[in-house]
Amino acid sequence: MLHMARRYLLLFALLVALPVCGDAPFSKGLLFRVQFDNETPSYLFGTMHSDHPDVVRIPAVVKQAFDDSRVLVLETSLDPENLVVAMALMVSEEQQDLQSLLGESVYRRCLAAAEDAGIAEPALPYFRPWALAMLFSVPSFENGRFLDWVLYQAAQERGKQVQTLESAQEQLAGLSDLSLEDQLALLEDALNNRPELPMFFRKLKAAYLERDLGALVSLSREGYQQQDAGRIARLEEALIYARNRRMSDRLDDLLSGGGRFVAVGALHLPGNQGLLALLQSKGFRVDRVY
């Protein structure tokens, strides 16, 4: 169960990679210097939750920024206790009649996806629909040592302080608070998109390695173009924009004095409602480094 809980952190940002409307500011780059007046600079680094060797290979300029920082700031804690909390939020004490909720055909596809994800059929009715959607959107991993985890371990080895921007409850609230109708639609979307997952993640990885945040945003639109506009707007607000506002408010305090290396999913960075624009609006100078 702990292994399954860790999987939610691997691609949470990619699961909620919903459209960013309009021309997105900060559409290029992964590492940005964030500085208030003449204070020691901090750095904001966009990660991809992947264990692919090309992704976890940290470029020299990023490593230097990490080495120069006193504190690592992550989206949420990677401690085992936090992962157990996340797992508990994904399941319910009461069974749900997924077969009736989804219909026979979709339920059969759900069973097949659950088997691939290592979820036994008797356990399936206890998982909340949003949690199944998330787990079915995760590709296979080689070792689970994704980029955020590599940074976290490096910080621990070097005695750096580690701070976080959200609790597991806060990070998953946008999903758990969705209506049952929206959760079921999200689950069906995940099932529909499963055959394209390998190709989708190859495209995401290529865009990430090109440091092309605009391309990441465009790719994130692909699976949602035909979906209900109202549902997309609700998901955007709950899963992206509300989280960005909360994280930027907390960074406003955490960045005081500088010396922080902040690592968050790359899709939190661009756009008028992205973290970089929000921090800029609070008076921080934001410069692309890499």
Image: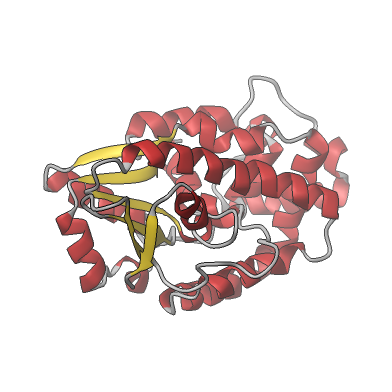
Left or right: 223 with respect to 32?
Answer: right
Nearest the viewer among 287 and 225 is 287
Nearest the viewer among 275 and 77 is 275
Residue 146: x %, y % from top left: 36, 57
Residue shown at the point (23%, 71%) measured from the top left: 61
Nearest the viewer among 60 and 21 is 21
Judged from this view, the residue extending furthest toward the front is: 37
Q: Is residue 94 above or below residue 102?
A: above
Residue 161 picture quarter: top left
Residue shown at the point (46%, 72%) measured from the top left: 208
Q: Is residue 275 visible?
A: yes
Residue shown at the point (44%, 62%) measured from the top left: 48
Residue 16: x %, y % from top left: 61, 52
Q: Is residue 51 visible?
A: no
Left or right: 130 with respect to 214?
Answer: right
Residue 120: x %, y % from top left: 60, 40
Residue shown at the point (50%, 45%) measured from the top left: 8
Left or right: 71 with respect to 18?
Answer: left
Q: Is residue 120 above or below residue 49?
A: above
Q: Quadrant of the C terminus?
A: bottom left
Judged from this view, the residue extending furthest toward the left is: 158
Left or right: 152 with respect to 178?
Answer: left
